[in-house]
Amino acid sequence: MNRNTLLIFKFDGILINTVELYTKKVWQALSELDPALVDVGDEVEDAIDRLISLNWEKGSYRLAEAVCRYLGAESMLDPLRQKLKILSLNMASEYQLNQGLMRIIAKLHNADFPVALYSRRTFENFSNIADLVRLDKKYFNFILSADHFPGDHNNHFRSLSDWSRYMGMQATYFGNTKEDSAICGDGIKLVTIPEQKRRPEEIFQADFLQEYLSVFVN
């Protein structure tokens, strides 16, 4: 990796703890509805964690639907949806910025690496959350949002790869699921960090990314 490579960081799940937080809330709701789900085994835990990471942005109904369909527990759908709505009311107050990773990003920026941030949120929604967690935007050369990409007929780019080619830059994208390849498109290197787990001792703190990037900013 060299200083001509744009480093793009995913906002939700990398820079702020939204995915981790939603995972904890869903498991809290599930355990309240059915205590037996606390000990379902690693395979089922991993499958539900994956469903959460893929569906949390789609709202409480879609998230509850995906989880209940996997569990074959359709009767749990409405109770789970209601619990998730209640648990989500004050969730934004629990959002936290990954300070360790921000220190790495600051070092990269100060070492003249071009750094970008990507959010699937609209820019307005992203800005509200960024202000809430006190994200210092000065360390990012570019901030990309859903306003740039598919979802609106006025968007000009189908992927980050389209955008990076337009800008004449090579890029590496740091995400947290293999599905991030969809927004990357062809021509962008995807670095996928290990997915977070719901047990406290396994909560993701971006140690993987900090170790990966530290060689460039020592």
Image (tube, rainbow, N blue to C red):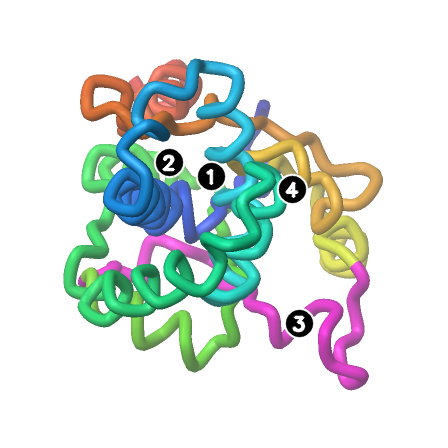
Mark with earlier residue (2, 3): 2
Q: What residue type is labelled 1?
A: Phe
Number of residues whose C-alpha sits closer than 10 Å to that of mark 4, classed few (under 14), some (14–19) or many (20 or more): some
Residue assigned mark 1: 113
Residue assigned mark 4: 180
Identify the image quadrant of the C terminus: top left
Mark with earlier residue (1, 2): 2
Provide the secondary structure element on which disc 2 rests: helix
Residue assigned mark 2: 108
Residue at (51% x, 66% y) in the render? 61
Provide the secondary structure element on which disc 4 rests: helix
Q: Which of marks 3 and 4 is in front?
A: 4
Report whether 114 appears left or right of 30: right
Compute the Cα span from label 1 to label 3: 23 Å
| Span highlighted in magenta in the image | 134-158
Mark with earlier residue (2, 4): 2
Residue assigned mark 3: 148
